Image (cartoon, rainbow, N blue to C red):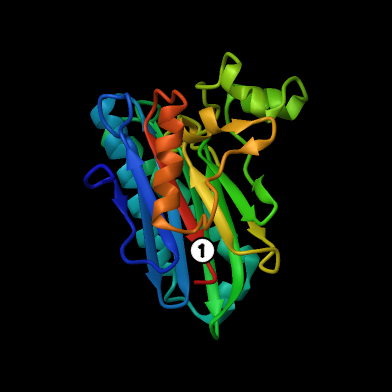
Amino acid sequence: MSEPGRVDLAGTRGMFGYSLTGKRESDQDFVACGEFGGVRAGVICDGMGGVRSGEKASKIAASIFVRRIGELSKKGRRFWLSEKKRHTAYRNLIEDCHQSVSDMAGGAGLSGTTLTAVVAVFRKGSLSSIDLVHIGDCRCYFLSDGGARLMTEDHSVTGDMVRAGYIDVHEIEETSGKNTLTKHIGDEAGSEADVSSLDVDGGSRFLLCCDGVWGPLHKSDGIWLPDGDVASQSAVEEIVHEAIERGSTDNCSVLILQLNA
């Protein structure tokens, strides 16, 4: 079973999550989902700043994100059809997460968490929009029959090295600086998240995972995935256990979203 209290799928359709402490003292990851009428959200957070502080930071940020999406779901059709309005709302939401995590820790920069989330909107039973909100180094992969395509960039020293062309993504795990974040929820700068909208016709399956999972599993040919149906509870559990078997020393958490379910 997942670590008690660290995964809250809230009965959301098409969402499968799993988290294990692994070789750490406690699980500082948090996975949360929510479904509010025609809006579904899934988020994964990886906390930092000491055991208790990291546990609280990830839960606070994930819970605020899902709760605020629930509040936004009550807005009218014009809001959800406007990419600009949605993106502005997500950025305001991230500011709230910054403030709440800083208040919990007793000041900015004393604790923190990464946050990667997908928000899907449906109209008349069909996908209308898919938005991606990301800060830190948890990742989002788009899943297709051809494998998995990385949709996010790590906000870390090694992420900067990838963008500068010094290393490839699969070399991050063996490069110094992989654990040094340049942006996260709760940082002193109150950094903005990356916010983007994805092609709804391109597919509807996504994998969100923390660095404890992608570290040992993302190689030169991409991230390892189990055979068979990836959008299932057994698949997320297999991915987590594979990461631990391959030597992960961190908490390991995965959330898979099957948005056409």
Q: In front: 205, or 156?
A: 205
Give the tally of numbered discs. 1
Q: Position of residue 142 (x, y in %)?
A: 62, 52
Please say if 35 is above or below 98.
below
Q: Position of residue 8 (x, y in %)?
A: 30, 55
From where the camera sits, is residue 190 visible? yes
* Image quarter of residue 158: top right
* Image quarter of residue 112: top left
Q: In front: 100, or 115?
A: 115
Q: Could you tell me which residue is drawn at 34 percent across and 36 percent down?
A: 102
Mark 1 neighbour density, 10 Å: few (under 14) some (14–19) many (20 or more): some
Q: Could you tell me which residue is drawn at 27 percent across and 31 percent down?
A: 53
* Image quarter of residue 198: bottom right
Please say if 24 is above or below 202.
above
Residue pointed to by mark 1 = 258
Q: Position of residue 103 (x, y in %)?
A: 30, 38
Q: Position of residue 220 (x, y in %)?
A: 69, 30
Please say if 184 is above or below 202.
above
Secondary structure found at label 1: strand
Q: Could you tell me which residue is drawn at 45 percent across and 33 percent down?
A: 243
From where the camera sits, is residue 106 visible? no
Most extreme residue toward the top is 176
Most extreme residue toward the right is 165
Q: Is residue 142 left or right of residue 4?
A: right
Q: Could you tell me which residue is drawn at 47 percent across and 26 percent down?
A: 246
Q: Is residue 219 left or right of residue 118?
A: right
Amino acid under label 1?
Gln
Q: In front: 16, or 31?
A: 16
